[in-house]
Image: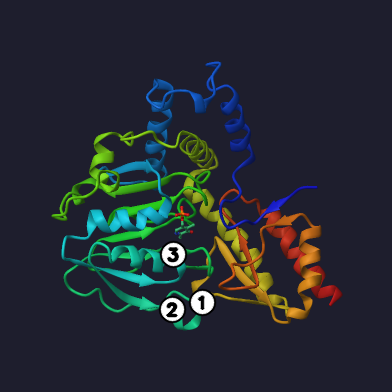
Amino acid sequence: MEIHNFSAGPCILPPEVMQEASQAVLDFNGMGLSLIEISHRSKEFVAVMEEARSLVKSLLGLPERFDVLFLQGGASLGFLTAAYNFLPEGGAAAYVDTGTWANKAIKEAKHAGTAHVIGSSKATNYDRIPSLDAVPSGSAYLHYTSNNTIFGTQFAAAPASSVPLIADMSSDIFSRTFDPEAYQLIYAGAQKNMGPAGTVMYAFDRDAIGKTGRTIPSYLDLAVHASKDSMFNTPPVFPIYVSMLTMRWMQSMGGVQAMELRNERKANLIYQEIDRNGLFEGHATVDSRSTMNATFRLKDEAHAAAFDGLWKGAGINGLKGHRSVGGYRASMYNALPETSVQVLVDVMQELERTH
Ligand SMILES: *Cc1c(COP(=O)(O)O)cnc(C)c1O
């Protein structure tokens, strides 16, 4: 039976990518060696790293002043790396509190300086993108989480800001087009739209680093990594290789613009059903809905056993909501086909017919 993978992360990747990646584990580029047993300094792997870095630039249309790195530590270390490299010693930055990941970013920023929270939707269990206060003067940047994976909310557009932006785009990178001009740093863990867990992508303005007045430990220093072309230490070769393949796949599909159209179709399909079907209700308010993660629940928990039986029976995997929201979460990353969303919609209609 075909499996429909709605997992929130790690999550679905294109089948073509899986095929090519598994081949490379056995025999990479006809070398008679596995990708994971050759030197990361071999010309074959350096070519992978360089293609991955350059695909990020072309897919996102980054201005020339941007550098791209693939490091370790996940987005969770990115929270600290962002603050260490862009928050001046004794300084402050503005943050938006839109949920679990945003909170972790705020917590890490406090290791480097003051974090002014200029908007929060905590009071309504993060069911919306809050309205924002003005960025306090003296703030170095405004940090936000573009898509809130757990609560199913997403900024419709970058927040208006008088200072440069920093964004954690872990769960919606490459899912829609945006203007990179206003950003100092964009970072994203690989395991949602890019590849396997184990690497995090940093795209940043090289002219904006080195200005904090702080001594930065080597691994946290983006300048150190940039000076070594993302090879300061042994990079996570397999996640970077698979990320590169996924980016090639996106490019062959028509790039981020094509992904955006596909994602809008999928999101419309599920949200129309959530709104139409009397048995369900969404978690996120309509204007804050995410195209990547749709959070919803049954109005009457008494139908849970029947619904769970139906979706599991249809081959759907990974639909259970995060414990902080409950209910269900349909994660519809780039690689999820529209037909999988249709299977979920059919199951929701089947529940309505029978209950
Ligand atoms: C998954 C996720 C993270 C955490 O990423 P790790 O790589 O596990 O550290 C951070 N931010 C967002 C928005 C996420 O979706």
Spatial distance from mark 3 to mark 2, Cα to Cα? Answer: 13 Å
Q: Secondary structure at mark 2?
A: loop
Q: Position of residue 319 (x, y in %)?
A: 67, 62
Amino acid type shown at disc 3: Trp
Mark 1 neighbour class, 10 Å CA radius: few under 14, some 14 to 19, many 20 or more: many
Q: Position of residue 350 (x, y in %)?
A: 82, 68
Question: What residue is at 65 percent from the left and 51 percent from the top?
Answer: 337
Q: Position of residue 166 (x, y in %)?
A: 31, 59
Mark 1 vs mark 3: in front: 3
Amino acid type shown at disc 2: Ser
**Left or right of residue 79: residue 272:** right
Question: Label 2 belongs to which residue?
Answer: 121
Badge 3 or badge 2: first in the primary sequence: 3
Q: Secondary structure at mark 1?
A: loop
Classify mark 3 as within 8 Å of ligand 1 or not, answering yes or no: yes
Do residues under tags 1 and 3 come within 8 Å of each other at their CB atoms?
no
Q: Pick the residue in front: 129 or 219.
A: 219
Spatial distance from mark 1 to mark 2, Cα to Cα? Answer: 7 Å
Examine the rendered structure and indicate whether residue 44 appears above or below residue 166: above
Question: What residue is at 38 percent from the left and 33 percent from the top?
Answer: 234
Question: Label 1 belongs to which residue?
Answer: 127
Classify mark 2 as within 8 Å of ligand 1 or not, answering yes or no: no
User: Quick one: quadrant of the C terminus?
Assistant: bottom right
Mark 3 neighbour class, 10 Å CA radius: few under 14, some 14 to 19, many 20 or more: many
The disc placed on residue 101 is 3
Do residues under tags 1 and 2 come within 8 Å of each other at their CB atoms?
yes
Question: What residue is at 42 percent from the left and 63 percent from the top?
Answer: 146
